[in-house]
Amino acid sequence: MSVLVTGFNGKVGIEVARKMNERNLSFTCAVRNVQKAQRMYGGEFSFVTLDFSDPATFGAALEGIDQVFLMYPPGDQIKFHQFLKVIKEKGVQHIVYLSVKDVQYLPFIHHFKNEKLLKRLGIPYTFIRAGYFMQNLHDFLGREIREKNRIFVPAGKGKTSFVDTRDLAEVAIHAFQHPEEFRNTSHVITGEKAFDFYEVAEIMTAVLGERIVYANPSFKEFKSYMVNKGEKEEFVNVVIGIHFPTKLGLAKGVTEDFEKISKSKPIALEKYVKDYKQKWLPDEEGHEQ
């Protein structure tokens, strides 16, 4: 078994790679800039060049690959459909695709179309339909939490089913190790409990020892603030879109899929905050970590 891990620089791909390493499995990480990745990680991982906007990189990246951890990449001029054609030409036997929870009700997002493309491709697939990443709290929400002690996102009072990306990676590993069991299946992966962002702020306050509040801005307030800060309007609109179902009360569903697959409990939100607490706290010299 040889796996190509795409999305290595994202919140899930890196966790898939780490778990593959832990289990001494055969894999290669796909990145746009191999030299930069090697400088950052040394010999910890093996890298190959893959740029989803450049079909010239597709063939070499997939040479000798049996299975692919596939994520839809950010960026312009993505040649995703062409990449899938090369996957088939190269004889890849299994694709584990990171999708999103409730994708079947979200025809306006890439994952809706991509799942259909993958089904038509004729290669065995596994869809991991993920809940809301806990890691968003130290990624695009992190700066406001660090600098202003507030969660600033337009999600209203709705609850959302958080999931730790380490659990998503665990499911991917199970799928790679047991491809027949996971052949042409979909799995909705969430934590045990859904939270609204007021509750998230309370948990973070308790763990960090710093008072964190949830600002609950309107869509208009959020967009105006973020664009004035210099964020690209396209990115801001994506963030609004992600949180729109939460505000409508449509994102609170939880499943037991992770426990059924892994035979263990999903990572709790409190543990995530403890594990990553230095992402929000300054170090002893007052610098952000």
Image (cartoon, rainbow, N blue to C red):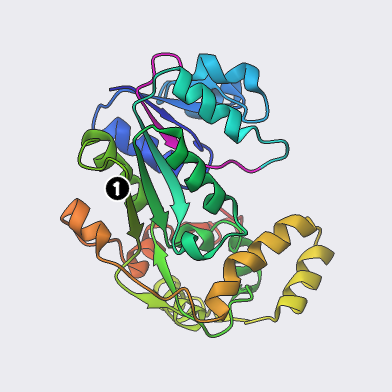
Q: Residue at x 38, y 50 (%)?
A: 128
Q: Is residue 169 above or below residue 17?
A: below
The part of the image, by quadrant, that contains residue 131 is bottom left
Q: Quick check: 118 left or right of 222?
A: left
- Residue 262 visible from this viewpoint: yes
Q: Secondary structure at mark 1?
A: helix
Confirm whether the magenta stretch covers residue 71. yes
Residue that extends furthest to the left in the rendered view of this protein: 263
Confirm whether the magenta stretch covers residue 167. no
- Viewer-proximal residue, 18 or 78? 78
User: Where residue 252 sits: x, y (%)?
Assistant: 42, 76
- Viewer-proximal residue, 215 or 235? 235
Predominant SS of the magenta segment? loop
Q: Is residue 259 above or below residue 62?
A: below
Q: Is residue 188 above or below residue 121?
A: below
Q: Residue at x 59, y 35 (%)?
A: 80
Q: Residue at x 64, y 76 (%)?
A: 154
- Viewer-proximal residue, 243 or 285? 243
The part of the image, by quadrant, that contains residue 202 is bottom left
User: Where residue 19 sits: x, y (%)?
Assistant: 31, 38
User: Where residue 88 sits: x, y (%)?
Assistant: 45, 24
Residue position marked by numbered label 1 in the rendering = 171
Q: Which residues are magenta?
A: 63-74
Quadrant containing the N terminus is top left
Q: Quick check: 21 left or right of 235?
A: left
- Residue 280 visible from this viewpoint: no
Q: Residue at x 31, y 33 (%)?
A: 20
